[in-house]
Image (cartoon, helix red, strand yellow):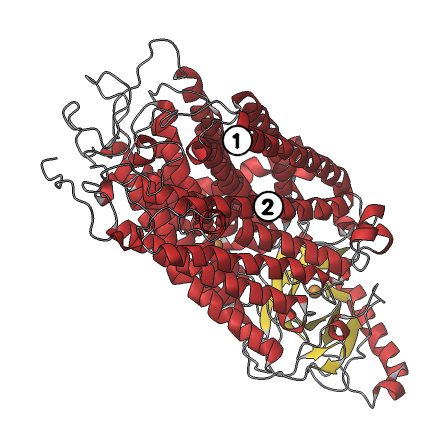
Amino acid sequence: MSTVAVPREAPHHAGVHAAPTSFIRKYVFSLDHKVIGKQYLFYALFMLVIGGLLATLVRYQLAWPGRPLPFMGKIAPDGMPGGVMLPEYYNSLFTMHATIMIFFAIMPILIGAFGNFVVPIQIGARDMAFPKLNMMSFWVAVPAAVVIIWSFFVTGGAAAGGWTSYAPLSAIQPRGQTLWLISLLILGLSSLLTAVNFLTTIINMRAPGMTFFRMPLTTWALFITALLLLLALPVLSAALIMLLFDRTLGTTFFLPAGLIVSGQPWTNAGGGQVLLWQHLFWFFGHPEVYIMILPAMGITSEILPVFARKPIFGYRAMAYSMCGIAGLGFIVWGHHMFQSGMNPILGTTFMISTMVIAVPSAIKTFNWLGTLWGGDIHFATPMLHALTFVAMFVIGGLSGVFMASTPVDIFIHDTYFIVGHIHYVLFGGSLFGAFAGLYFWYPKMFGRLMNERWGRIHWFLTFVTFNLVFFPMHFLGMRGMPRRIYDYTQYKHLHGLQGMNQMMTISLFVLGASQLILVLNFFLSMRRGAVAGPNPWHANTLEWQTASPPPHENFTGRIPTVYRGPYEYSVPGHGADFLPQNEPGGPAPARAHA
Amino acid sequence: MRLPHAARALRAALLFSAAALAPASAFAWPEWMRLPEQASTYAPEIDNMFHLIMWITGVIFVIVELLLVFFLWKYRHREGRVATYTHGNNRLEVIWTILPALICVMLALLSRRIWEQIKEKMPHDAVEVHVTGEQFAWNFRYPGPDGKFETADDILTLNQLHFPVGKPVIVTLTSKDVIHSFFLPEFRVKQDAVPGMKTRIWFQGNRVGQWEIACAELCGLGHFRMKGFVTVDTPADYEKWLADQAAQQAADAPKAAEAPAPPAAAPVAAPGKTEAEKGGSS
Ligand SMILES: [Cu+2]
Ligand SMILES: [Cu+2]
């Protein structure tokens, strides 16, 4: 503890700038990480609504295949003439649902919104290392969203090859696929800039005394996430460019010789490798899953100690397990390709690495339980969502063991079992984590608290309907219902499943409607919510030791000095049950970690 | 694969309990919670593995969720309650690192054995069929009387796969256009049919009957109706079916002689245009 550095103004404050006064510089082209974080928040919530609407259309078709939706006949006359959904439109819907949710909703809300807003304040910095780059990240992400939405309106409709866009189907799809590629290339650039910015900021701009092992776990999670982005995204971008060239310049990276499409030889084919796309895509795609879950894990690890009034259990184990995930995450991609024709011996190799990567997630889950054990647990809305994250992530994690087993995967691969699994990870996990973060940091972002009662109602309805929509997917998968299928009633063995599908769809309608409560709560609380004050949750981390919302450059006066770890709650001999990181003195410092 | 004695005993015990529990659960549970009928020789092995994982993860699931709810109830905030001040416990960390690791490694070893049997080793003396996927149909090719593929007497069928019960079948998969996936749910068979690649898989029917073949890899607008039929015949019925096909083909021969390739058999008319007509990006 005696090694705490003397308070100093870090010399790296190249990014520090005078508070802007004009509307444009303040709210539109802002360099302030807090404004950019809020911009990402609105961006992500908007895209979340679009992604959700696409999902309801998909589920409508699954519940009542072919039943017309007259108003959709007016909105999308090409895809749903007379309101009856065409198969290619159905394919566009689920492709775009996944693409938008993954790239335009979950990543921006977790990384762009919470990462941007929280990380610099949590480490005691005045802004990100490169504020202009940060602004550029956001404004590059905007045209990407415009292009992806625009693609619905071009001839042939939006991309319809699945969010995985397997070649050669993606090479022979209509024009929407080209826009899909361009959009993701642009968005990739945005994410890459963000990753560089986070890494530089976290490595160089921590406040005096903020050692790596005193960083809050949200910051740890975003640090690892940025590292994954930096290493995985270039591979995706390379693949996207190759596919774009195959579609537009006549190259044949993914097109083998002798392709015959609808009886005609495909013009540019020969020399390409179909599986190459899958290797490149999943080399990115598996780390991508962790890119979407790690920040939510960080948020959960942040919220549990605050509302259990107890230090996080196994802080270092939490940090190391994230490092473990980061390393192992790059050698498991082949588990998406067990049935692809890849050498089965390689399948065994990837199965073993995949089984091993389950271990860090298990460690984290047990440490969350350990954090709750012996706590003084308060059930505020952020806590309800964080606890739901834990409960649902357990399901998503355990269902992953099924498809990790190569022989079991033979049957459940490309069935609804996989769809159920990924939604327990990305909705039960990432999105509940995002909701937790939203309720938790909302008072910091807007200076007022969200309404607690409506927050609980929103949580309850979301929790119940979420499980009604997604848990039955495991049963659909066990019955052999393939994913991405426009009309499963074609198959004899799937005949009995329509009732279950209807129940799921109706639950989704309720789930969607429940989100209106969140929307109303979100906007009304900005004006009407109770004034939060700097530290409404009595939390220790630095973002709570400054005003809500924080002033320009985050801290008035000097940058705080950090004296201890982030989760010193209920320290014996200390009056209050929390002990902020920057509070000098206090009882004898805790041992680093058992 | 060689395992130490203890591991082998453990494996036997686990497989036994999985096998014992699986039928018990099958009787108690409604159909929509069960795996489909088992029509191939290795379907029970895959299902046992599925059920083993289901029991292991099910037990972990129940323990973790019960602990979670119990802790939330027991340690809920009440007036005067003070949280325990602890940063963790190294012995616990070691236990809950090693235990999941052991379970996962064990599951990997058990899976490996089944996987090897199914996908790495090919049986001898099998019926050979070549399968070519196309948007949106399955083409089957039998070697015909001469026993050789790509000769004039090959027997070609569309969406109809027949083979005899009790004899292994080796299927060589490929595709003309995009990736398809050859999915026989009741046989626990799934393998992608990839253009530019030939993938060999095997399976063996254990009962006579007719089931459906699904395409499990998104392959375009007609993906959902890329359906075929698989019929497992008695050996006699199978020979008869082959002979019937050969005879019918011979009757059609004058037409087919000029085009050795199987008739492209345009798939059922789709609403809208075909993929290629709408594509044309290059
Ligand atoms: Cu993966
Ligand atoms: Cu297909």
Ligand 2 shows up in which quadrant of the image? bottom right
Residue A526 - label: 1
Residue A146 - label: none
Closer to us: A527 or A179 = A527
- As drawn, the residue found furthest toward the left would be A2
- As drawn, the residue found furthest toward the front would be A22
Closer to us: A563 or A173 = A563
Where the N terminus of chain B falls, by quadrant?
A: bottom left
Residue A46 - label: 2
Instruction: Tell how many labels.
Output: 2
Residue B153's spot in the image, x, y percent? 77, 84
Where the C terminus of chain B falls, by quadrant?
A: bottom right
Q: Amino acid at mark 1?
A: Met
* Circles 2 and 1: CB atoms closer than 8 Å: no
Drawn side of residue A387 relative to residue B227, left or right: left
- Residue at (40% x, 60% y) in the render: A193
Q: Chain of mark 2?
A: A
* Helix, strand or loop at mark 2: helix
Drawn side of residue A489 relative to residue B120, left or right: right
- Residue at (38% x, 29% y) in the render: A304
Please indicate, yes or no, whether residue B116 appears anywhere in the rendered image.
Answer: no
Residue A58's spot in the image, x, y percent? 71, 48
- Can you tell which of label 2 and label 1 is closer to the viewer? 1
Above or below A231: residue B124 = below
The answer for how far apart the CA atoms under marks 2 and 1 are is 17 Å
Residue B142's spot in the image, x, y percent? 73, 75
Graded by Cα atoms within 10 Å as few (under 14), some (14 to 19) or many (20 or more), the crowding at tag 2 reads: some
Above or below A119: residue A195 = below
Q: Amino acid at mark 2?
A: Phe
Above or below B194: residue A359 = above
Q: Chain of mark 1?
A: A
